[in-house]
Image (cartoon, rainbow, N blue to C red):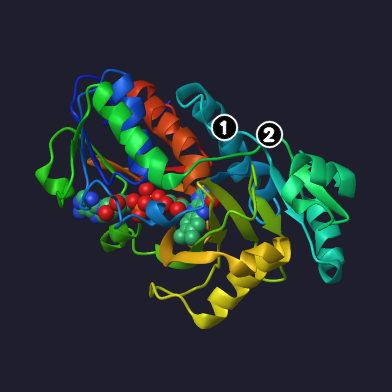
Amino acid sequence: MYQSSLSRGDSPVSIIGAGIAGAWQALLFAQAGHAVTLYERSDAAMTLATSHWAGGMLAPWCEAETSEPVISRLGLRSLDLWREHFPDTAFNGSLVVAHARDRADFERFAKLTSGHRRLDAAEVSELEPSLEGRFRDALFYPDEGHVEPRRVLPELHARIAEAGGIIKFENDAGADELDGIVIDCRGLAARDEQRDLRGVKGEMIVVETSEVELSRPVRLIHPRWPLYVIPRGDGRFMLGATSIEAEDTGVSVRSALELLGAAYAVHPAFAEARIVEFGSGLRPAFPDNLPRITVDKKKIAVNGLYRHGFLLAPALAELTLAHVERGAIDNEVMRCV
Ligand SMILES: Cc1cc2nc3c(=O)[nH]c(=O)nc-3n(C[C@H](O)[C@H](O)[C@H](O)COP(=O)(O)OP(=O)(O)OC[C@H]3O[C@@H](n4cnc5c(N)ncnc54)[C@H](O)[C@@H]3O)c2cc1C
C-alpha cells in the first residue's frame, strides 16, 4: 500500500478555505481528534466563497443525467454523512417537470436517471398543492435532499468549533507559512498552483412571494441548463442556475430572463414575486469537471467540486481523513504526486 508521508497522526492540521469543501474537511478532522485550524479570507458571512451562491441541492440521482458514475458514488456516501452529522437536513426529494414542448427531453431525462417514480397530475398536486393543475406528470426523486448554504455553512463552522477546531476568518493564509498537514481548499483561488482549474459561472436570483409554497426543489427541463426553483423558507425562493464558461461575476439580462421565465413556468404567481437578489458564483472545475484530491509531500489539495460541492464535500473529507490516518487511496479521485 502507498504510505503517505503525510500520515502523521499527531501533526496539527491547517485547512485553507472555509467554503463547503474546507468546512467538511475541518469538521471530520476535528471530530477525529486532530488539532485543526481553518483559515478563511472572507469574514463569517462567507461572501467571497462560491459556496455562498449555491443552490445546496443534494441530488445524486438527478445529477447522473450529465455526470460520471463517480459523482453518484461519492454523492450517495455524502447523503449518509449529511444524515449522520446534520439529522435536520431536508430530505423531501426533488421534482422534475417540463413544458409540453420539452417532452422529448423530459423522457430522455427519465431514461438517463434512476431513483425516481413517475407521478400523475393528481399525485403532483398532492405532493405540492401549489402546483395543482400545472403539470400533467412529473418525476419524483424521493431520496434527494437540499440544504440552505447560507445557514449550513455557519452551522458547520459552529460544529467545527464545538469539536475543538479553531477558525480564523479574514485571514489570508499561504501554505508555506503553516505547520503540520496542510489541506488546500481554496476553490478557484488555488489556480496559482493548480493551473488547469477554471471558473464556470452560475447565476442565481432570489425572489420572495407568499403566493407559492414548495417543500422541495423543482427542476424544469430546459434545453440548455437544468433550471430550478428551491424553497428557502419565509416565502423566499432561489432560482438557479446558469452554467457559462466565463469568469466574470455579472448577471446578464438574458440569464435573468431565462431564470425568471423558468420560475414563471413553474408557477405564474412568480410574476408578482419581489426580486430580492441577483448574484453569481464561479464553480471551480478541472477540464474533466471531476473532483480531485492531490497529495504531495507538503500538502493535500481538494478541489474541482464544480457543480457538486455540497453533494461531494462530506465524502471527499472522509477520503482525505482515511488517507491521512491509514494511507488509504481512492484511485478515482486521488492523485499522489
Ligand atoms: C449558482 C450556483 C449554484 C450551485 N448549486 C449547487 C447545488 O445545488 N449543489 C451542489 O452540490 N453544488 C452547487 N454549486 C456548486 C458549489 O457551490 C461549488 O462546488 C462549491 O461551492 C465549491 O466549494 P469550495 O469550498 O471548493 O470553494 P469555495 O466555496 O469558493 O470556498 C473556497 C474558500 O477559500 C477561501 N480562500 C481562497 N484563498 C484563500 C486564502 N489564501 N486564505 C484563506 N482563504 C482563502 C475563499 O474565500 C473561499 O471562502 C453551485 C454553484 C453555483 C455558482
Secondary structure of the residue carrying numbered label 1: helix
Q: CA distance from mark 2 to mark 1?
A: 9 Å
Instruction: From the viewer's side, name the closer residue of 160 and 98.
Output: 98
The mark total stands at 2
| Residue type at the position of mark 2 | Asp
Q: Is residue 5 left or right of residue 255?
A: left
Q: Are marks 2 and 1 in contact (CB under 8 Å)?
A: yes
Residue 332 visible in this rendered orientation of the protein: yes
Q: Residue at x 54, y 75 (%)?
A: 256
Q: Is residue 22 left or right of residue 94?
A: left
On screen, residue 109 above or below 166 = below
Q: Position of residue 273 (x, y in %)?
A: 57, 64
Furthest toward the left, the residue is 177
- The local crowd at label 1, few if under 14, some if 14 to 19, many if 20 or more residues have their Cα within 10 Å, is many
Residue 290 visible in this rendered orientation of the protein: no
Secondary structure of the residue carrying numbered label 2: loop
Q: Position of residue 111 (x, y in %)?
A: 83, 51
- Which residue is disc 1 drawn over? 79
| Residue type at the position of mark 1 | Leu
- Which residue is disc 2 drawn over? 143
Query: Which dot, 2 or 1, sits closer to the camera?
Result: 2
Q: Earlier in the sequence, mark 2 or mark 1?
A: 1
